[in-house]
């Protein structure tokens, strides 16, 4: 089982250039359809300079996840704020509480990309920013892209543990059907020893 990341388009409010007039409606419908899956985790990406209550991403997630159980807020551009105007209350899950909370990250800027700053250097700079920031350093290791990655891996592990018994049951039911078919069709039962041991190989699940 793998963790699949689907990068959905941003919510468009007005049609630009040659975009169709109903681009806003179509975009919202596409996003809503994708995040309606009860097994998916919603990463609502919000620039730090945006008021969380005006976030289109959070508004959409609220529609399909009213109890806010499947949504993780990812706050970008944290480095663009100052000590006076910061997003500390958002990152501490006080401004807009989510069951899974918010994670602040500092990504490469367009300038960094143009100057070919590699990912390792960018990650080191991100770590340094949070460790030395007078407001965010109190958050410890609960910020940064590394923490976000760790969080997603933990969520996947919990999900696998939760559904593993169902997978095992499904496999055993399918094997029982196969064994019944073989037992009812002697011509298929070419090797009794083989068919008898086949199901047992799956009992290690």
Image: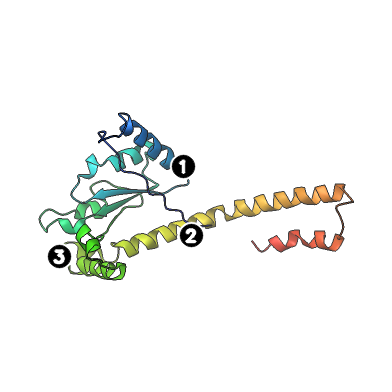
View extreme (left): residue: 84
**Nearer the N terminus, badge 1 or badge 2?**
1
The residue lying toward the viewer, choosing from 137 and 58, is 58
x, y (%) of residue 59? Answer: 30, 38
x, y (%) of residue 68? Answer: 36, 44
x, y (%) of residue 60? Answer: 33, 38
Helix, strand or loop for disc 3: loop
Which residue is located at x 29 percent, y 34 percent? 18
- Judged left or right of residue 146, residue 194 is right
Helix, strand or loop for disc 1: loop
Which residue is located at x 19 percent, y 60 percent? 111
Which residue is disc 2 drawn over? 157
**Nearer the N terminus, badge 1 or badge 3?**
1
x, y (%) of residue 168? Answer: 64, 55
Which residue is disc 3 drawn over? 134
| Image quadrant in which the C terminus is located | bottom right
Which residue is disc 1 drawn over? 37
- Judged left or right of residue 6, residue 54 is left
- Judged left or right of residue 25, residue 165 is right
């Amino acid at each position: 089982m793998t963790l699949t990341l689907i990068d959905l388009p941003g919510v468009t409010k007005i049609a630009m250039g040659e975009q169709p007039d109903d681009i806003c409606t179509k975009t919202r419908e596409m996003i809503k359809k994708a995040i309606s899956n009860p097994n998916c985790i919603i990463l609502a990406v919000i620039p730090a300079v945006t008021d969380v209550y005006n976030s289109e991403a959070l508004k959409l997630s609220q529609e399909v996840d009213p109890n806010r159980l499947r949504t993780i807020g990812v706050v970008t551009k944290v480095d663009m704020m100052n000590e006076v105007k910061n997003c500390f209350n958002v990152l501490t899950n006080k401004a807009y509480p989510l069951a899974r909370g918010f994670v602040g990250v500092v990504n490469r800027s367009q300038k960094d990309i143009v100057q070919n700053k590699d990912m390792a250097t960018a990650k080191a700079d991100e770590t340094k920013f949070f460790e030395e920031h007078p407001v965010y350093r109190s958050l410890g290791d609960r910020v940064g892209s590394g923490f976000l990655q760790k969080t997603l891996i933990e969520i996947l592990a919990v999900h696998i543990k939760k559904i593993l018994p169902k997978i095992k049951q499904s496999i055993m039911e399918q094997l029982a059907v196969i064994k019944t078919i073989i037992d009812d069709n002697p011509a298929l039962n070419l090797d009794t020893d083989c068919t008898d041991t086949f199901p047992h190989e799956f009992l290690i699940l």
